[in-house]
Image (cartoon, rainbow, N blue to C red):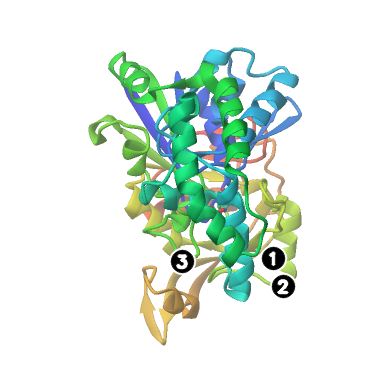
Amino acid sequence: MSTLVIVGAQWGDEGKGKIVDLLTSRADVVVRFQGGNNAGHTLKVGGEQIIVHLIPSGILYPNITNIIANGLVVDPSVLISEKAALRERGHFQKDSQLLVSDRAQVIMPYHKIIDHGREDLLGKAKIGTTGRGIGPAYEDKASRMGIRVGDLLRPASLRDRIYNVMDEKNFLIERRFKRPKLNPEEVVQEYLSYGEQLAPHIADTTIVLQSFVRGGSHVLFEGAQGTLLDIDHGTYPFVTSSNVVAGNACAGSGVGPNVIEKCWGVVKAYTTRVGEGAFPTELTGSLGEELREKGGEYGATTGRPRRCGWLDTVVLNHSVRLNGLTGITLTKMDVLTGISPLSVAIGYELDGKPIDYIPSDINEFGRVKPRYREVKGWDEPLSDCRSFDDLPKNARDYVEMIEHMSGVPVTLVSVGPAREQSILRKTPF
Ligand code: IMP
């Protein structure tokens, strides 16, 4: 057995899709364990760009099993259209490449209406969600009102469950959010048809995964979002609705903690965030604009411009601690070429006192002022570097500074979006 969890170590969009896609060449199974189609993992292969939102990033390799595990919230219409789009481009030719847990939760039309309705009513206080119905679907899971993927294959109980739940949903939709009510029978018919289309993929994935683990397979757990968006450990309430941290790879896929061997955090060489919420190292002027343009920092899911700022090692060390990171994969180093000096936050000041942690109170977090260290940048383009020694000295120093400040080895440095633009310093499997 050999297992690796990959998680985002900042606010998401660190470049996990590329890293998972790259490491997948050495894996037998790729498992997504939380979130839904709020994620957007961009893969670049042979000049072709593919963005997947729900299907694990291992789908481009024909002989790998991809699992959408129990911890996800699944929008079946998105899954079906993502599958069709991949097929049309010559990928995902065999149904056996993808399994979907019968225990995963289903995103229903009312979840999306409620997600949008809430955000509209919150006005300025909105979270800035992706509007995909993620939060309301997780709420229903916790309140035992959820529809699960396996229900899509059981017409009588699906109808019962939808009718039971929709009284309350329609009350909210009509009275609170002032939108037209949904017709439960239409919802039943639509979701039964999704069940038929997805039937070849639906399985008890915990049993399948367990047999891979017992058989000594290489398993890669693909996290979505980032640690600072974790519902418990992130910048609450400006977070997503699931546990993003590596520990949830177990509950979210149905394996015991003794199965997890390594955990690598994906860290962008600077910081970005989409949606609302405090962001201490944010650059709001021309430098932020430069990072956004050079780094192509526009959301893969919603197209929103990402807020950009300096690397923050308080954020990084929060992630190291909460995930138990054993490695860091550093992405987008090439984007920093030509920017000098570079600043890196090495601590905060809160109301005049130095601190080195993320306060749990969002108002306190909003008041922290970063303490910066300035380091020299470099002018050489990095996109053709293929070994650590190919990097200019100041870029190597930047990597080593991150190792020093976090106490975690940088196992991979990414210098461009393509698979080959990667310097792998340690093999995961
Ligand atoms: P939700 O997950 O759609 O409920 O959105 C909650 C917050 O998480 C918002 O700030 C989103 O912008 C953010 N978010 C959700 N998924 C991602 C992601 O994959 N990358 C970056 N931010 C995300």
- Nearest to N terminus: mark 1 or mark 3: 3
Quadrant for ligand 1 reads: bottom right
* The C terminus, quarter of image: top left
x then y, percent, for residue 289: 74, 64
In this orientation, which residue lies closer to the viewer: 371 or 316?
316
Q: For the residues carrying marks 3 and 2, which lies nearer the camera in this image?
A: 3
In this orientation, which residue lies closer to the viewer: 377 or 162?
162
Q: Give how far apart the Cα atoms at labels 1 and 2 are.
A: 6 Å
Mark 3, other Cα within 10 Å: few <14 / some 14–19 / many ≥20: some
Q: Quadrant of residue 185?
A: top right
Element assignment for label 1: helix
x then y, percent, for residue 235: 45, 65
Element assignment for label 3: loop
Q: In which quarter of the image is residue 273?
A: bottom right
Q: Residue 237 carries which label?
A: 3
Q: Do the residues labelled 3 and 2 touch (CB within 8 Å)?
A: no
Direction from residue 264 to residue 25 in the image, left or right: right
Q: Give how far apart the Cα atoms at labels 1 and 3 are.
A: 25 Å
Q: Name the residue under label 2.
A: 285
- Report the residue at 36% width, 58% height from top: 232
